[in-house]
C-alpha cells in the first residue's frame, strides 16, 4: 500500500526526482493559471456577465469578507496570499472526484511547503505593517517572560498546520482504499463524499488560521494607526 | 517469541490504544465546544458569524490532537522504524 503520492516516481536523476506529487501540483497550477486567465481575459462590467465571471466574483468577494471579518481592515493587501492558499487547497481536494487522481495535499512535503509559506509570510506582513521594532515587540506580549513561549508557539503552529492538512487528506484516501478491499462499491462512495466535505473544511480552516496568525502579527500596528487617526480627527 | 513478533504485537496494540484514546478525548472536547457554542448562539443570534468562526478555529485545534494520534498509529503500523533492525 502506498502511503503518499511521493512514493510514485516517474523520473530520477541523482538526488532529483520527479514524483506524482510534483506532477499533480504543476498540473493544478497550470489549471488554475489558465482558468483564471481565460476568465479574466474579457471582463464585463455589464449586468450580463458570463457565468464563470460571476462565479469568480462571488468567490473573491466571499474570501474578502472572511478576511475582513477576522480583523484585517484592508483585505486587498492579503487577498493574493490567502486567496491563493485557499483556492489551491480547495481545488486540489475537490478534484478527488476524478478517478485515479491523488491529491498532492496527501503528501507531507506539499503541506509542509504551504505551512512554511505561512511561517515566512507572517513576519513579512507584520514588518510591513508595523516596522521591525513593532513586530519584534509583539513577541514580548503580554510580558517579556513570554518570549520563549511565543517563539515555541510560532514553530509548533507551523508543524500543526502541516500535519493537520496532511493527516486529514491522507486518512481520507487511506480509509477509502482500505474499505475498497473489505466492502465493495457502496460504502466507499459515502466515505469519499465525506472526504470531499472534510477537504473543503480543511481548505477553509487552513486559510482562516493563516489569516488569524497574520492578524495577530499586525494587530498592534493597526490599533496604533486607528488611535492616531482618531486623535487627528478629534483635533 | 522472537523479537519481530514482539515488535509487531507491541506496535499493533499501541496503535489500537492510541487511536482509541486519541479519538475519544478530542471527541469529548469537541462535543463540549460545540454545545457551548450552540448555547451562545441561542442566547445571542447576532454574534453567530463570529462564534461560528471562532468555533471552527477551536475545533481545528482540538482536531489536530486527534490527527496526531492517527498519524502516530499509521507510523506504528506501516512505517515502524524498529522493523529495519530485525528484518534487514
Image (cartoon, helix red, strand yellow):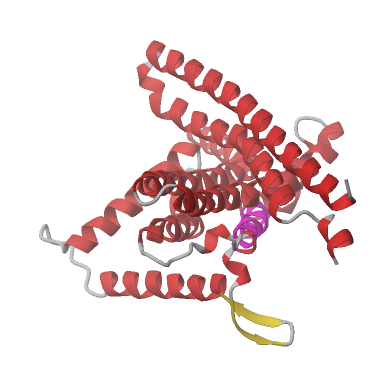
Taking the view exactly as shown, the residue that stands out farthest to the front is B1
Give the x, y percent position of residue B43.
40, 11
**Which quadrant holds the N terminus of chain A?**
bottom right
Residue A234 seen from this side: no
Residue A212 seen from this side: yes
| Magenta stretch: includes residue A185 | no
| Magenta stretch: includes residue A121 | yes
Taking the view exactly as shown, the residue that stands out farthest to the bottom is A13
Give the x, y percent position of residue A130.
65, 49
Examine the image and state in which quarter residue A35 appears: bottom left
Give the x, y percent position of residue B71.
66, 47
Whether residue A126 sits left or right of residue A49 in the image: it is right
Taking the view exactly as shown, the residue that stands out farthest to the top is B43
Examine the image and state in which quarter residue A95 appears: bottom left
Secondary structure predominantly adopted by residues drawn in magenta: helix
Magenta residues span A110-126
Q: Residue at x 60, y 49 (%)?
A: A167
Counting the numbered discs, the total is 0
Q: Residue at x 54, y 73 (%)?
A: A20
Above/below status of B32 relative to A91: above
Q: Which residue is drawn at 64% across and 63% down?
A: A109
Q: Which of B44 and A43 is in front in this view?
A: B44
Give the x, y percent position of residue B31.
52, 21
Q: Which residue is drawn at 57% across and 34% down?
A: A227
Q: Which of A103 and A208 is in front in this view?
A: A103
Above/below status of B11 relative to A115: above
Examine the image and state in which quarter residue A40 appears: bottom left
Q: Nearer the viewer, residue B7 or B23?
A: B7
Amino acid at each position: 500500500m502506498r502511503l503518499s503520492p511521493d512514493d510514485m516516481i516517474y523520473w530520477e536523476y541523482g538526488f532529483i526526482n520527479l514524483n506524482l506529487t510534483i506532477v499533480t501540483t504543476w498540473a493544478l497550477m497550470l489549471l488554475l493559471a489558465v482558468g483564471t486567465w481565460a476568465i479574466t481575459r474579457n471582463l464585463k462590467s455589464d449586468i450580463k456577465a458570463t457565468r464563470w465571471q460571476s462565479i469568480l466574483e462571488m468567490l473573491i468577494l466571499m474570501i474578502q469578507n472572511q478576511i475582513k471579518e477576522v480583523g484585517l481592515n484592508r483585505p486587498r493587501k492579503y487577498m493574493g496570499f490567502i486567496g491563493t492558499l485557499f483556492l489551491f487547497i480547495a481545488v486540489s481536494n475537490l478534484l478527488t472526484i476524478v478517478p485515479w487522481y491523488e491529491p498532492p495535499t496527501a503528501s507531507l512535503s506539499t503541506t509542509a511547503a504551504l505551512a512554511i509559506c505561512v511561517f515566512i509570510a507572517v513576519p513579512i506582513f507584520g514588518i510591513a505593517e508595523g516596522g521591525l521594532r513593532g513586530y519584534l515587540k509583539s513577541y514580548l506580549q503580554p510580558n517579556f517572560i513570554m518570549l520563549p513561549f511565543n517563539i515555541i508557539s510560532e514553530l509548533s503552529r507551523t508543524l500543526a498546520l502541516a500535519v493537520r492538512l496532511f493527516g486529514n487528506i491522507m486518512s481520507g484516501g487511506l480509509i477509502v482504499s482500505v474499505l475498497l478491499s473489505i466492502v465493495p462499491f457502496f460504502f466507499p462512495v459515502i466515505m469519499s463524499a465525506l472526504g470531499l466535505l472534510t477537504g473543503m473544511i480543511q481548505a477553509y480552516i487552513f486559510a482562516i488560521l493563516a489569516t488569524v496568525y497574520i492578524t495577530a502579527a499586525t494587530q498592534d500596528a493597526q490599533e496604533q494607526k486607528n488611535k492616531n487617526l482618531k486623535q487627528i480627527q478629534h483635533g | 517469541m522472537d523479537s519481530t513478533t514482539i515488535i509487531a504485537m507491541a506496535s499493533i496494540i499501541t496503535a489500537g490504544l492510541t487511536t482509541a484514546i486519541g479519538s475519544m478525548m478530542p471527541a469529548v472536547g469537541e462535543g463540549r465546544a460545540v454545545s457551548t457554542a450552540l448555547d451562545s448562539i441561542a442566547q445571542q443570534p447576532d454574534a453567530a458569524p463570529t462564534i461560528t468562526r471562532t468555533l471552527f478555529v477551536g475545533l481545528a485545534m482540538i482536531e489536530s490532537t486527534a490527527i496526531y494520534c492517527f498519524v502516530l498509529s499509521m507510523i506504528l503500523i506501516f512505517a515502524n522504524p524498529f522493523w529495519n533492525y530485525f528484518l534487514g
